[in-house]
């Protein structure tokens, strides 16, 4: 993995480290995301696959495999569902190449939990929240719509800073599985887009 790439997106993961660290794939056997990374005049595409297999009582074996621009890297570890956040954070430290892709996933789930808490569990389509960040810029978070994907209802959540898109995501309402995560830095002309292409649900072994 070329170290000069994806630097801005590592910051996303670091924000999670010092904020709310959350990652969960409850109810999922495997998910494959298509990847699209744009930096200035270059673009790269690839895939990210996460698989969850029974290991022993109370634990799972988690496999991560990424292919991007002709480069491939992977890792496997064991953890319990209650300890997923710590396990994935350990992966970020041990293999920084994954930070650019796991960071946005963790951020999307963390943001959803924050919004759920702010609305006291009444998060619905039409939600709108405005706040100033530490630099005095207006940050807007909204839920403009929802849709059914992979047989599940999901919210589209958008975040803008000073009217510019910084984060868009489509996240399943109940299990917090991100179907789409799109992170943009307009000033630096950088963007990373993840979109789930296949998901196998544990309860029904349903693949779409």
Image (spheres, rainbow, N blue to C red):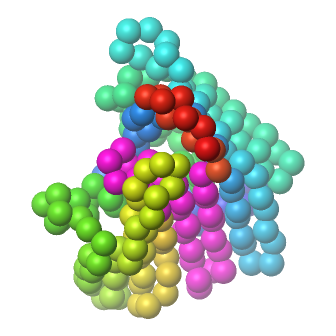
Q: In the rendered view, would you say 60 is above or below 179?
A: above
- Please indicate whether residue 129 sits to the left or right of residue 17 in the image: left
**Residue located at (86% from left, 48% from top):** 70
Which x, y percent locates residue 189? 66, 80
**Residue located at (45% from left, 64% from top):** 147
Q: In the rendered view, would you say 56 is above or below 199?
A: above
**Label tally:** 0
- In reply to whether residue 176 is colored magenta, the answer given is yes
- Please indicate whether residue 154 sits to the left or right of residue 11 in the image: left
- Please indicate whether residue 33 sits to the left or right of residue 108 in the image: right
Residue at the limit of the structure toward the left, as seen here: 120
Which x, y percent locates residue 41? 80, 78
Q: Quadrant of residue 26?
A: top left
Relative depth, front residue between 92 and 120: 120
Relative depth, front residue between 137 and 51: 51
Q: Is residue 109 shown to the viewer in this render?
A: no
Q: In the rendered view, would you say 189 is above or below 122?
A: below
Our reading of the magenta stretch's main secondary structure is strand
- In reply to whether residue 165 is colored magenta, the answer given is no
Q: Quadrant of residue 119?
A: bottom left
**Residue located at (70% from left, 64% from top):** 37
Magenta region: 170-196
Q: Is residue 125 shown to the viewer in this render?
A: yes
Which x, y percent locates residue 145? 40, 73
Q: Which quadrant is the C terminus positioned in?
A: top right
**Residue located at (79% from left, 62% from top):** 44
């Amino acid at each position: 993995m070329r170290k000069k790439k994806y630097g801005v997106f590592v910051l996303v993961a670091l924000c999670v480290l010092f904020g709310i660290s959350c990652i969960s794939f409850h109810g999922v056997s495997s998910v494959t995301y298509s990847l699209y990374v744009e930096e200035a005049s270059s673009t790269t595409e690839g895939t990210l696959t996460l698989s969850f297999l029974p290991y022993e009582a109370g634990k799972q074996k988690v496999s991560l495999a990424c292919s991007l621009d002709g480069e491939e890297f992977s890792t496997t570890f064991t953890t319990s569902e209650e300890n997923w956040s710590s396990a994935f954070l350990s992966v970020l430290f041990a293999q920084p190449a994954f930070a650019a892709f796991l960071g946005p996933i963790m951020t999307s789930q963390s943001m959803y939990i924050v919004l759920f808490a702010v609305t006291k569990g009444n998060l619905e389509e039409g939600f709108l929240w405005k706040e100033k960040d530490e630099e005095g810029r207006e940050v807007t978070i909204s839920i403009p719509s929802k849709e059914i994907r992979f047989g599940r209802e999901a919210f589209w959540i958008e975040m803008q800073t000073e009217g510019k898109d910084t984060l868009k995501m489509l996240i399943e309402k109940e299990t917090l599985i991100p179907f789409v995560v799109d992170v943009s830095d307009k000033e630096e002309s950088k963007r990373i887009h993840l979109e789930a292409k296949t998901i196998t649900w544990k309860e029904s072994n349903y693949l779409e």
